[in-house]
Image (spheres, rainbow, N blue to C red):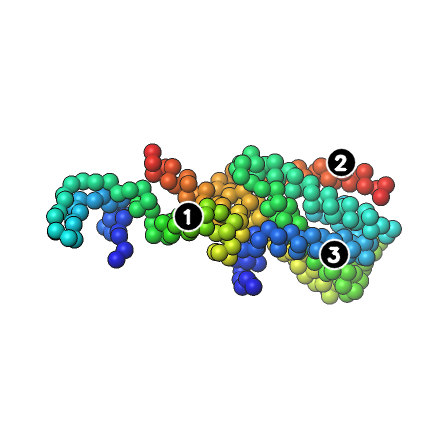
Amino acid sequence: MKKLNWKTIFNPFEKFTERQLFICGLATSVIGSFLFWFFKQSNDGIYHIGPEPGISFTKTLAETTICILLPCVLLTFVGKLINSKTRSIDLLNATMIHRIPLTTGIWIIQLPFIKISTNEIMAAIKNNAVQSLPGSTLWISTLSSMLLLLLFVYAIVLLVNGFKTAVNVKKRGQYVVFAVTLILAEVIYRFLLYPRLSKF
Amino acid sequence: MKLPVFCPSCENPLRVSQLKCTNCTTEVNGDYDLPLYLKLSREEQEFIMAFFLASGSIKEMARQANTSYPTMRNRMDDMIEKIKTMEK
C-alpha cells in the first residue's frame, strides 16, 4: 500500500504502476459516463459541459471515450516527437485520471442549493433583473464557481504532471507545445467531432 | 570509508595522485584519472548497481523502488545523458 502525500495527490503517475492507474482510470471513466447520463449532462467540449435532457448512455460513453482518446492520441504524437521512448499507455492513463476532478465537478453543480441559485441567476438574466438577486444566491454561485475552477486547475495539474512523467519534459518550450496541443484537441472536439455525436 | 570524488573546497572532480599496496607498502605516485563509474555520485553508483542486480530490468527496479516505470526510465535517461556528457 502506497502512502498518500501531496506529491502522490498531484502526481500519482510517479508512484503508481500503469496497471493500477489504468484500472482506476477505466473505472472512473465508466462511472463518469454513467453520472453524465444520470444527471443529463453532455460534454459539448473536452473541458465544457452543458445540460442535454434526452441524452443516452451510449452518447455519454462515446463523449467520454473521445474526450479521453483525442488528447491522448495528440499528446502521444507530441510526446514521441520530444522523446521517442514515450509510451502511449502512460499518456492514456494521464488523460483518464485527469478527468476524475472534472467528473467530481458534476456532483457539485447537481447539489440542490447550487442548482436553485443557478436557476435564479438564469431567470434574473432572462428578465433583466440581476440587481434584484439576493446576496446569498450570488455567494453560492461565486463559491461553487471557484470550487469548479479549483477542480479544473487540479485536472490540468494532473495532466501536466502525467505528461511530464511520461515524456520526461525538461524545457519550457515543451510545456507550450503541450498547451497548444490541448487547445487543438478542444477545437477538434468542439467543432469537428461533437456535432457528429448527435446521432447517438 | 566513502571515496570522495569531488573537491570539498571547489567541487571540481578529483584525480588519483597516490596508490598504495597494503601488503608491501609500495606507493605509486602520479596523476591518474578516476574511472567513469567512480566519478559518479554515491547515489548514482548505487542506481547503476541496482540496475545490474535487477538484470537490466527497469520494470523490476521500479517495482523494488516502489515507483512507476516512466519515473525510473526518466532517471535512467537522465543518467545516460550525464554519462555521455562526462565522456565528451
Type of the residue with mark 3: Ile
Say which residue appears at 76% left-offset and 52% top-offset: A33
For the question of whether residue A23 can be seen, the reply is: yes
- Distance from Cα at disc 3 to Cα at disc 1: 43 Å
| Mark 2 or mark 3: whose residue is earlier in sequence | 3
- Checking the image for residue B52, the label placed there is 1
User: Is A3 on the left-hand or right-hand side of B32?
Assistant: right
Is the N terminus of chain B in the top left, top right, bottom left or bottom right quadrant?
bottom left
SS category of the residue bearing label 2: helix
**Camera-nearest label, 3 or 1:** 1
For the question of whether residue A138 can be seen, the reply is: no
- Distance from Cα at disc 2 to Cα at disc 1: 50 Å
SS category of the residue bearing label 3: helix
Type of the residue with mark 2: Leu
Above or below residue A12? Residue A174 is above
Which residue does the numbered mark 2 point to in the structure image?
A192
Chain identifier of the residue bearing label 2 in the image: A
Tally of numbered discs: 3
Chain identifier of the residue bearing label 3 in the image: A
Type of the residue with mark 1: Phe
Q: Residue furthest right?
A: A54
User: Is A115 on the left-hand or right-hand side of B12?
Assistant: right
Q: Which one is in front, B22 or A197?
A: B22
Say which residue appears at 81% left-offset and 59% top-offset: A120
Chain identifier of the residue bearing label 1 in the image: B
Which residue does the numbered mark 3 point to in the structure image?
A31
SS category of the residue bearing label 1: helix
Q: Residue furthest front?
A: B23
User: Is A80 on the left-hand or right-hand side of A185?
Assistant: left
**Camera-nearest label, 2 or 1:** 1
Say which residue appears at 12% left-offset and 48% top-offset: B26
Locate residue A137, reporting x and y percent: 75, 63
